[in-house]
Amino acid sequence: MQKIIEVKNLTKKFKSLTAVNNLDLNVYRGDIFGFLGPNGAGKSTTIRMLMTLINPSSGSIKIFDKSLKQNRNEILKKIGAIVEKPDFYGYLSAYKNLEILGQISGCDTSNKRIMEVLELVGLEKRYKSKVKTFSHGMKQRLGLGQALLHNPELIILDEPTTGLDPQGMKEIRELILHLSKEEQKTIFLSSHILAEVELVANRMIIINKGTTVVEGTVQELLNATNLKVTFEVDEIERAKKILSETQWQKKIESFGDYQILFLLEKEEIAFLNKFFVEQGILVHSIVPKRSLEEYFLNLTEKGA
Amino acid sequence: MKYFLALILFFQLGFAQTKDGHEIIEKVKKKFSEVKDYQVDVKIIVDVNFLKIPPTEAKIFFKQPDKVKIKSQGFAMLPKEGLNFTPQSLFNKAYISFYERDEMYDGVNCAVLKVIPLGEVSEVILSTIWIDKQYSVIKKVESTTKMNGTFTIDFEYGTEGKHLLPAQMVFSFDAGKMNMANNLGGDMHGDSDAPKPKKPKLTKGTVKVIYTNYIINAGIDDSLFEEKKEKK
Amino acid sequence: MYTLVKIELYKIFRKWRTYIGFMAIGVLVPVIQIAMYFQGAHYLEFLTRNFKDNFVFVGNLLNGYLIAYIILGSLTIHIPFLIALVAGDLLAGEATAGTYRMLITRPVSRLKLVTAKFIAGLIYTNLLVLWLAVISLGLGILIFGVGELLVIKDAIIIFAQNDILWRFAFAYASAALSMSVVCALGFLFSSLVENAIGPIVTTMTVIIIFTIFSAINIDFFRTIRPYLFTNYMSTWHLVFDDPVNYDEIVKNLLVLTGHIAGFFGITLFIFKRKDILT
């Protein structure tokens, strides 16, 4: 599988602060790569280094198997990016902003292409409006538009769903999946909304204090986490008594009127269900609650 | 007899020494009165070290006794004393004159007179005038003024002006004495670091006026000399 | 590069602040001209008062050329401010708007981007001076007509009518070069900060302070004067001299050009290495 992004020992120091510290990461062609970390972890700094907004203190960045330092323009032609909050020339229209950015990039800025992109991000009706009249969500969409205008191979998105309503978030998610599956784009997605990453990403990295905490496929990482599972049973007191005599006791988090909350590994759900059935306790429902957020908080707090 | 002849000679000589300046002046005035009016093209060349003006051209109109008008396409500058100079202007006010001597000046046999204007009004204190004896025209004037030092006006005559009016006039003046020096308030743009020319030594300056194409006594309407607002 | 410059010019001329300069000159110059129309005769009287004692003048000395000359000399602080207003915003304005992130992530080198911006700034500067020329000379001639030009320096010089226009052409070109230095300085300051106000104020402060230093006739300031670029900004007036000191003019123009190159060079150096954090 071709490596699209290869970062090795990437470091960035600002005077006494080390924002990124020997970071390694790899993104492969076709990935939707989740880039996670708490505030101040170094995500934006890393993205800015990928987009040559910031010069690394040391380390190397290769994109499309070429050194970013030596092949900057060639590489950037194939990347579309939103870096933090997308800002435009407020006194110009959405159309004009895209046209100008496209002209600088040297890509197709025909009326057809620009309107195509605006339609893709749902702004075709506001193409003449000055960007200063846009809401935050609309600017996000336009940001996505400018990232897609020149049909890049790699798309770097920094918090793309910030400020969007649930419908908007869903549309962005679907767009990301479409771009990945139908158009074979590689997507580098930085987000605080872990559920978003889980829903779209196939690989991810969690960083903290500028360093890799864990990297792998989403599935592997999520499987490594425990799940909170709520069992709704009919005889709660009898269930309590039975459980207290077994190893399942250690897995109990809390009790409700008819619910018992367990912290289980995924495979254990079926076994516990089987146990209840064998004990003659009826199970009305099993509701697993993914604890990626807890996992994330755990990892980042403990610095695991 | 001898003594009688000597006496007559003495009186003759004496008479010659006390030739009447007034009489000479009247001859000049009479000669000039033949000119009722004239118009002439002039070329003006200014040579003063703190005045840098390109040669300019103008037309001068004159009508007796003292109407003068300058017309020019562009800028022209003429010394007042030279422009307004006529025998009438010189001699119409009260004055004392006396004949001093005869002198060959610039190849012309001249009678040299001293003229002292009377009255407080006159700017001129004393004038020395060289008068061409043959044509009864003023050849040179040298005047000392109260405020502006001494100026000299040299005239040259030719057939152009029919020996009545000058073909050329050179007005020389003491630039240091003239108040024009006050105009030079220092370099307005004093930030130049080039070696500045020293503030010009205020020496003599001259204005040469060359007269050509006289039209004499053709008749000039008085309305020409009326002050009109110049159209731009 | 042509596309980039075109885009930068488009951005400059889509901002209202760009038109402040043109409007200011469009108002200021006619106001001066109107004042001279009514009071100019007195002004000329004052200038030539001592001549009038001894000389008779004819001709239109109060003409478009004299007015244009006076205007050129009197706008030494105003025009730099109007230049700094735009130059100071060229880079800092992108930082304020947050559009650096969009701009610098394009597949175009920072060298080209900053050069295009600088060229656009210079074009604006030259257009502003051209506007000044058109309105002060063009409108001046329409109102006051033509004639000889009276200039008072160490000597009183009157230039013949056919000997003036080329001097003005040169004077405006020289003024444009001087203002380009202001543009370059404002541009340099603009690369250092994230808000346009700072570069605008700083540029003007530098010009005012240097101008004051140039004006003080104390030995120390005389010594440093040749090193202050403001000392060379009125090179334009050297062409209104007789004879014209071409050596000094060439020297001054080279100094101004050197300053432009120097300021731009420093800006380029800073900008290429700058971490864009906005």
Image: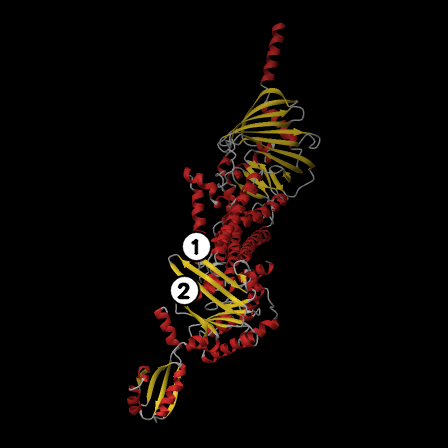
Residue at 58 percent of width and 74 percent of height: A116
Closest to the observer: A136 or C55? A136
Quadrant location, the N terminus of chain A: bottom right
Q: Which mark is in front, 1 or 2?
A: 2
Check disc 1 and report its element: helix, strand or loop.
helix
Q: Quadrant of residue A292?
A: bottom left
* Three-letter residue code for mark 2: Gly
Q: Is residue B75 left or right of residue A233?
A: right
Q: Quadrant of residue A2?
A: bottom right
Residue C249: horizontal and vertical position, in percent? 56, 41
Residue A173: horizontal and vertical position, in percent? 49, 77
Q: Is residue A186 left or right of residue C220?
A: right
Instruction: Determine if residue C193 is in view.
Output: yes
Label annotation for residue C201? 1
Residue C154: horizontal and vertical position, in percent? 51, 37
Which residue is denoted by mark 2 in the rendering? Answer: A210
* Three-letter residue code for mark 1: Val
**Crowd class of label 2 (few under 14; some 14 to 19; many from 20; radius 10 Å):** many
